[in-house]
Amino acid sequence: MITISEAEARVMDVLWQAAPRTSEEIVEALREPTGWHEKTIRTLLNRLLGKGAVTAERDGRRYIYAPVLTREAWQQQESRSLLDRVFGGKVTPLLAHFTRHEKLSAKDIAELRKLVDDIEKKGR
């Protein structure tokens, strides 16, 4: 399991959108929206490399980065962690929380109904 910080997730998001990318391209994609300095972004890249979340291939004098950790695997880890920490590992309290504290659109409700229908069909 590869655990990444919120800042590292921002770097990963750039790579999940389009990879492989050079460090210069990653810096350019993150500098303005985050306000981070180039050194900060390169440090985050090195941390991700050390964790095995990305690979780096040398291309002349530069490195080209690609994700190893997929967005889907990260989402699975993060959602499981949230469920375990906040909702005792149960999905129902999570959904109940959102139905009480968030406004669900008609589209959201229709999608939830479809998910429940699909789950019931698979269970039969």
Image: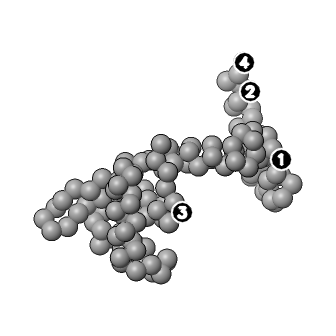
The residue to which callout 2 is attached is 120
Tell me where residue 103 appears, x and y as whole percent: 81, 60
Which dot, 2 or 3, sits closer to the camera?
3
- Is any part of residue 15 visible from this angle? no
The residue to which callout 1 is attached is 96
The residue to which callout 4 is attached is 124
Secondary structure category for the residue under label 1:
helix
Which dot, 1 or 3, sits closer to the camera?
3
Q: What residue type is labelled 2?
A: Glu
Q: How far apart are marks 1 and 3 (CA)?
A: 26 Å
Looking at the image, which is closer to me, 4 or 105?
4
Nearer-N-terminus badge (3/4)? 3
Query: CB under 8 Å between callouts 2 and 4?
Result: yes
Tell me where residue 32 appears, x and y as whole percent: 45, 80
The numbered disc on residue 8 is: none
The numbered disc on residue 6 is: 3
- Classify residue 90 by image quadrant: top right
Nearer-N-terminus badge (1/2)? 1
Q: In this view, does 36 lie to the left or right of 115?
A: left
Secondary structure category for the residue under label 4:
loop
